[in-house]
Image: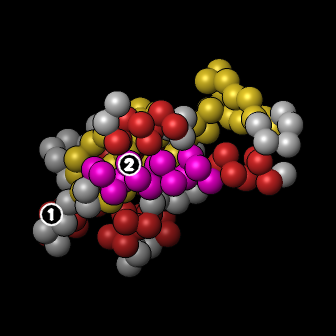
């Protein structure tokens, strides 16, 4: 396995989707990925920090009319600033500690998160770091 494949495998990190942005029409799954989020990843949040609270809320409305309009505005702002990057939607299994040095897990229950970075490698590394953190948190409890 190459290094990236090994890191994903070793940390039980599953990459669900990767989307370059801004790039054409906003995909429905991208809007839905943020529907149950409290906020955007820091890399995306920088583009909307001057927006009003209700304008930002549209980004977390899922695939709705307000959501589509808010994401179109975000894409326009990124294009205006000549910025681009990759959104990575990742999942990890839910871990259960089962001993001093081990944990069990099942892909029947997962944690999901979405990341943004200027390169796909950096976005995937954020997902891997998050996955490691989820495991370490369980092992410390």
| Residue depicted at x 58% and y 56% | 38
Predominant secondary structure in magenta? Answer: helix
Residue 123 in the magenta stretch? The answer is: yes
Residue 66 magenta-highlighted: no
Image coordinates for residue 44, horizontal then vertical, percent: 36, 63
x and y, in percent, of residue 103 in the image? 75, 35
Residue 69 percent location from the top left of the image: 30, 51
For image coordinates 46% across by 59% down, the residue present is 40
Tell which circle, 1 or 2, labels the residue nearer the N-terminal end: 1
Residue located beneath label 1 in the image: 79
Instruction: Name the outermost residue toward the bottom.
Output: 50
Q: Secondary structure at mark 2?
A: helix
Q: Which mark is residue 36?
A: none
Residue underneath mark 2: 124
Q: What is the distance, in whole Å, between disc 1 and disc 2 at their CAs?
A: 23 Å
> Which of 47 and 62 lies nearest the eye of the viewer?
47
Residue, x 58% and y 49% (percent of image)? 132
Judged left or right of residue 116, residue 139 is right
* Range covered by the magenta-colored residues: 120-133
Please, is residue 56 above or below residue 125 in the view?
A: below
Q: Which percent across, then down, holds residue 92? A: 57, 36
* Residue appearing at x 36%, y 53% in the figure: 123
Q: Is residue 69 visible?
A: no
Residue 18, quarter of picture = top left
């Amino acid at each position: 396995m190459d290094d990236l494949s090994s890191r994903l495998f070793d940390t039980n990190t599953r990459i669900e989707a990767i989307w370059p942005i801004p790039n054409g029409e906003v995909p429905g799954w991208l809007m839905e990925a943020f529907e149950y989020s409290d906020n955007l990843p820091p890399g995306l949040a920088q583009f909307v920090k001057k927006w009003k609270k209700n304008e930002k809320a549209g980004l977390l409305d899922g695939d709705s009319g307000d959501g589509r309009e808010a994401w179109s505005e975000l894409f326009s702002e990124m294009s205006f600033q000549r910025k681009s990057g990759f959104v990575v939607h990742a999942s990890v299994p839910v871990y259960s500690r089962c001993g001093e040095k081990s944990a069990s897990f099942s892909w029947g229950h997962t944690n999901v998160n979405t990341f943004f970075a200027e390169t796909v490698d950096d976005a995937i590394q954020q997902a891997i770091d998050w996955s490691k953190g989820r495991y370490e948190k369980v092992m410390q409890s």
